[in-house]
Image (cartoon, grey):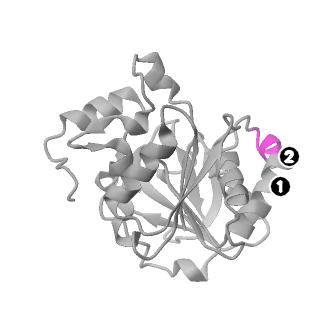
Amino acid sequence: MIVIPMAGLSRRFTEAGYDRPKYMLEAHGRSLFAHAVASFAACFESLPFLFIYRDVAGTPDFVAAECHRLGIRDMRGVVLDAPTGGQAETVALGLQRGMVDAAAPVTIFNIDTFRPGFHFPTGFDPAAVDGYLEVFRGSGANWSYVRPAAPGSDRVAETTEKVPISDLCCTGLYHFRSAGQYLGAYADFAGGGAARLGLKELYVAPMYNLLIVEGADIRYDLIPAEAVVFCGVPAEYDAFLARRDAAPLPG
């Protein structure tokens, strides 16, 4: 299952004067929602998609219409009635209220990030590990990070939020072996794990630490930095608008 949490407040866009949630803004002939979700075009026929959102600015109808236009076979929506404590809580509420099968694999992705031509890793079998994070080489204090277990290894020893412990920055794509595994880790995380890690917001990446200490096999998948486009703040949106190589999506 592909899970798209989109219950954030789009605060930076609101402060910049935009009157719609950022996923409704348009660029190169399509909404930012369509650009993000089209990352998984290869999965439209084979996997269910779960969207988790608040009922603002006509979002439920907007999501349904965009998914129909994109051709998603199995689209599900969960409406939240209030902002959450972070993306990890948003996903947990979506899985619970959407009554997702506890055994279903879960791949989480941001609504403000684009991964044209996404495919699952080939360097390891996602079905044979407990989870993985997609990463690129970068720097800065605004990313989630992974630290490899050893040089040259794709096994993860530690994850952090906005604390650089390597040059492996997360794209925002997080895979968990199952919804049940995710919800178990989240219960620990929200019940004190986040506080023990010094976090005030419930991010997804640090949750992997709770699995790692229990012996879980967590990997990372390294992609080229140019294979991902970020559109989470107005400056990134402006940069995407200015790109001449960002052709409209087909269809």
Q: Magenta region's main secondary structure?
A: helix
Mark 1: few/some/many CA within 10 Å (<14, 14-19, 20+): some
Q: Quadrant of the C terminus?
A: bottom left
Residue 101, picture quadrant: bottom right
Report x, y in % for residue 147.
Answer: 58, 57
Q: Is residue 235 left or right of residue 84?
A: left
Rendered residue at 39%/50% (across/down): 65
Rendered residue at 56%/67% (across/down): 132
Towards the viewer: 178 or 151: 178
* Range drawn in magenta: 194-198
The amino acid on which the numbered mark 1 sits, given as a three-letter code, is Asp
Report x, y in % for residue 60.
Answer: 51, 44
Q: Is residue 48 left or right of residue 72?
A: right
Label placed on residue 94? none
> In the structure shown, which secondary structural element does the residue marked by tag 1 occupy?
helix
Q: Quadrant of the N terminus?
A: bottom right
Towards the viewer: 90 or 193: 90
Q: Which residue is mark 2?
A: 192
Residue 212, picture quadrant: bottom right
Residue found farthest to the right: 191
Rendered residue at 47%/21% (across/down): 14
Q: Is residue 62 left or right of residue 166?
A: left
- Determine if residue 45 is in view: yes
The amino acid on which the numbered mark 2 sits, given as a three-letter code, is Gly
Report x, y in % for residue 67.
Answer: 40, 56
Mark 2: few/some/many CA within 10 Å (<14, 14-19, 20+): few
Q: Which residue is mark 1?
A: 188
Q: Is the Cβ of the residue at disc 1 closer than 8 Å to that at disc 2?
A: yes
- In the image, is residue 114 above or below residue 9? below
